[in-house]
Amino acid sequence: MDTDPDVPIESVKRSYAVVDAIRERERAGVTELANALDLPKSTVHNHLRTLDALGYLVRRDGRYRLSTRYLHLGRESRNGNDVFLYGREEVRCLAERSNRYCQLVVEESGRGTILLATGWHYEDLPPSARHVYPTHEHLHTNAPGKAILAHLPDDRVADIVARHGLPERTDRTITDESALDEARATVRERGYAVDRGEMIPGMAGVAAPIATDGRVHGAVAAYGSGAEMGPAIEGDLPTLVREAADGVRADLTFAALE
């Protein structure tokens, strides 16, 4: 694992690399992790023992999995986020009104994170989407991410692209900066972003930003199967999504005045 000058304490970086590797595999042993991370088994073993002793990992039959401490930490982080506090009811109402899979998304460290997802009708989704829909993804690959990018300052977008690149998820994903700039301009002009299979084949969605006074707090999105989403995107779905985002924006604005 290469050193990173932006990470001053390499041992902490390695611990998080171990955690991420276990998360990707659900369960893993020392040898598997050492091979995946290109680290000595003794080093990996020390990190595993430490994380186990602190209660962040659980060891069973020589393999490790993440403990439920992450569940509690995640809930506390989400519940302390103003976008979640003021946006959850709007997104739930949007799911009921639209009969779509709806999301509340924020940007953290240049990536998109889903704070809330509701209205998921598993049997209505294409098989490609049933097990691979991410909760943490590159912003340029999806509707809420593009809605957020459209309202971030140009220098911030440049920093995100420099850090994370524009990796391809599907053959429809934006992969160059000029196309991204055009997409951002289109989102600002019409007030919402569209994803037509850019992240997952067979899935389409529309998203609107939650923006106040030059600051973008996140985005509200609605997704569904591409075949039936086409007419919805051309119909009233963008209006419903924008109304939900505006509702969150209004609540955030009033809360800031209190």
Image: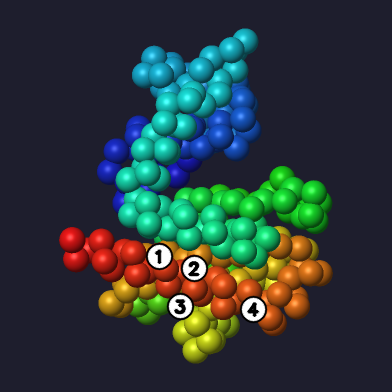
Q: Earlier in the sequence, mark 3 or mark 4?
A: 3
Q: Which mark is residue 236?
A: 4
Decide which of 171, 183 is in the foreground and name it.
Answer: 183
Q: Earlier in the sequence, mark 3 or mark 1?
A: 3
Query: As shown in the figure, which amino acid type bears the numbered disc 2?
Result: Ala
Query: As shown in the figure, which amino acid type bears the numbered disc 1?
Result: Val
Element at label 1: helix
Decide which of 80, 112 is in the foreground and name it.
Answer: 80
Vertical placement of 52 versus 83: above or below?
above
**Quarter of image, res 257:** bottom left
Residue at mark 1 = 248
Query: As shown in the figure, which amino acid type bears the numbered disc 3?
Result: Ala
Query: As shown in the figure, which amino acid type bears the numbered disc 4?
Result: Asp
Dot 2 and dot 4 residues touching (CB under 8 Å) = no
Quadrant of the drawing holding the C terminus: bottom left
Label 3 crowd bin: few (<14), some (14–19), many (20+), radius 10 Å: many
Q: Residue at x 51, y 65 (%)?
A: 220
